[in-house]
Amino acid sequence: MKRDKIIFYIATGLLSVIVLFSVYMYVFKHEAIVGAFTSLGYPPYLIYPYAGLKLLGLFAVWNPNFKTLKEWAYSGFFFAFILAFSAHIMVNDGGHMTAALALVFLIISYIFNKRINK
């Protein structure tokens, strides 16, 4: 049980670092992100709501009291990372590895969250 908790906290912590870095970029490097979103084919007006949803998702993933909301957050992150990976592959800008890493950490976090909360 202790090993499972350690793996959960490490994977979720690394996932949080990636998500918080992207939120930081969305808010404080907005002009660069507008260019990136436009090159990926997404409208720039999604940047701020997307940053807010990422923060809410992290809150749900870390909070043990919101079991249903946590499932929705994991699901939302899963689809966001899959879409980010495929969008970066399509435009061939090299950003796909961050999305792939986030997806790996998300899956590990989800599996070990289920193991420690049986």
Image (spheres, rainbow, N blue to C red):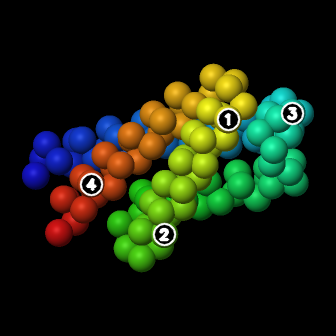
Q: Residue visible at 22% across and 66% down? A: 117
Toward the bottom, the furthest residue is 68
The residue where tag 2 is placed is 72
In primary-sequence order, the first of circles 2 and 1 is 2
Q: Quadrant of residue 37?
A: top right
- Kind of residue at disc 2: Trp
State how far apart marks 2 and 4 are (Cα).
15 Å
Q: Residue visible at 66% across and 40% down? A: 87
Q: Quadrant of the C terminus?
A: bottom left
State how far apart marks 2 and 1 are (Cα).
27 Å
Of labels 2 and 1, the one closer to you? 1
In primary-sequence order, the first of circles 3 and 4 is 3
In the image, is 57 to the left or to the right of 104?
Answer: right
The residue where tag 1 is placed is 90
Toward the left, the furthest residue is 1
- Kind of residue at disc 1: Met
- Numbered badge on residue 35: 3
CB within 8 Å, label 3 to label 1:
no
Q: For mark 2, give the secondary structure.
A: helix
In primary-sequence order, the first of circles 2 and 4 is 2
Q: Is residue 31 visible?
A: yes
Q: For mark 1, give the secondary structure.
A: helix
Q: Is residue 20 visible?
A: no
Q: For mark 3, give the secondary structure.
A: helix
In the image, is 33 to the left or to the right of 107?
Answer: right
- Kind of residue at disc 3: Gly
